[in-house]
Amino acid sequence: MKRLLDKRRSRRLHFISLGIVFFVFIYVALCIFLPLPAIRANVGSVTLRLKAPPAQLPWPNYGEAAVGMVGAGLTQTYGTQTPLPTASVAKLITALAVLTKYPLTTGQQGPFITLDATDYGYYTSYIAEQGSVVPVYSGEQLSEYQMLQAMLVPSGNNIADSLARWAFGSIGNYDTYANSFVHKLGMTHTSVGGDASGFSPLTTSTASDLIILGSKVMANPLLSQIVGSKSVFVPNVGTLNNYDNILGSDGIIGIKTGNSNQDGGVFLSASKTTINTRTVTLVTAIMGAPSLKNALNDSLPLISALQNSFTKSVLLSQNEILGEFRQPWGGRIQFAAYSNLSLLTLPGQTLNVTFNVRSLKVPARRGAVVGSIRVPTDQLNTAFALPIVTMQASSKPTIAWRLLHPGSIF
């Protein structure tokens, strides 16, 4: 009996031993021969802000200035960018604000506004202060469009206050709205106060903020049409000329002049130029000039230089490292741009491009494509994708590592 039990126990131990050997064999085989899992990159999808090198521009030797492009925003600045009185350039804020409440499209007149004694009072008050005015009388009716014309072209201070009071109920209400409005536009160094015309020195801004303002105005078809007018006809007054006497020079299509006792000359300009068959709109701003004549004349060489400064810029170099894969068994595999990323840019322009990197299957050779940099269509360039490649081949883990890290394999 005992001999029979020993035989059974021996047979059981034999099967257990065979099972263990079989399990170990299978485990070792799987650890050695199963493919390794893909490795995730330390970055997946990232937006890069790439800035083109700045250009040497003929900046004025006073005040502050800035340049940019519609659709691309601010590109370069000169001076301290300290808030200065805007003078009549503030009327562009008034126009945009009014159109948010009472939108118009090209060809529309909008509602007719009946002027009253308060409006006539604005007129006489600005005459007494030697501000720019457009004659009005109590009981006169002008359409919203006609008031925008009278405010922006012959720069009627009184028209700006009348239009703001009509749209917002009072100048105080307008100032409150306008301050919130400009900050939402991104004009964080701009303050509106005292009136809607900019005659008050309480309305201040910087040249860099004015680039934002000018871009918004030129993106509005109705306003870009008005500010590009050399003259306008105002009922009961006649034809009135634009203070921008260089309109039409060097491709200039607007925008607004300003001058006051606190700021001798301000000029926010827009000009069109054609680059590789694409038409772009450039925006320049000069503030703190000794006079309006200085601001206008000194804008011309700045605009001309800007129009001729477009260039092919290398924004990412070939083999420029963008990130890496870290191998669980040690070592890293870097990835980079396959070739130079060269784009046509306005100097100082910032472009946003995105790159996406997928997980890396190993083994992987050097130069394996693991993602792409995607460049969107903009004013100057057509969308395309640039491959991202590995800079090293993957290494092989040791058998010991495979055996000791089953969780990384199974």
Image (cartoon, rainbow, N blue to C red):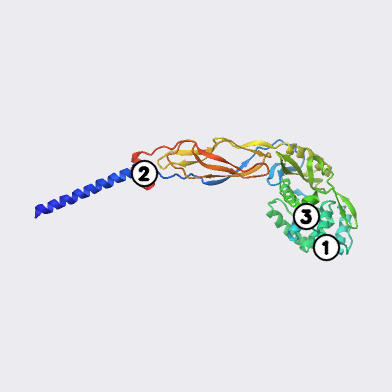
Q: Residues within 10 Å of mark 1 (few under 14, many from 20)?
A: some
Give the residue number, with chain letter if any, for mark 2.
34
Q: Nearer the viewer, mark 1 or mark 3?
A: 3
Whichever of callouts 2 and 3 sits on the residue coming sooner in the sequence is: 2
SS of the residue at dot 2? loop
Is residue 359 shown above or below 312? below
Across and down, in percent, residue 83 comes to: 73, 48
Is residue 398 shown above or below 232? above
Q: Residue type at mark 1: give it.
A: Ile
Give the residue at x 69% y 47%.
Answer: 71
Give the residue number, with chain letter if any, for mark 3.
106
Rounded to the nearest angstrom, the CA distance separating label 1 from label 2 is 81 Å
Q: Residue furthest front?
A: 277
Across and down, in percent, residue 23 comes to: 28, 47
Q: Nearer the viewer, mark 1 or mark 2?
A: 2
* In this picture, residue 267 sits left or right of residue 52: right
Q: Residue type at mark 2: give it.
A: Leu
Give the residue number, with chain letter if any, for mark 1.
113
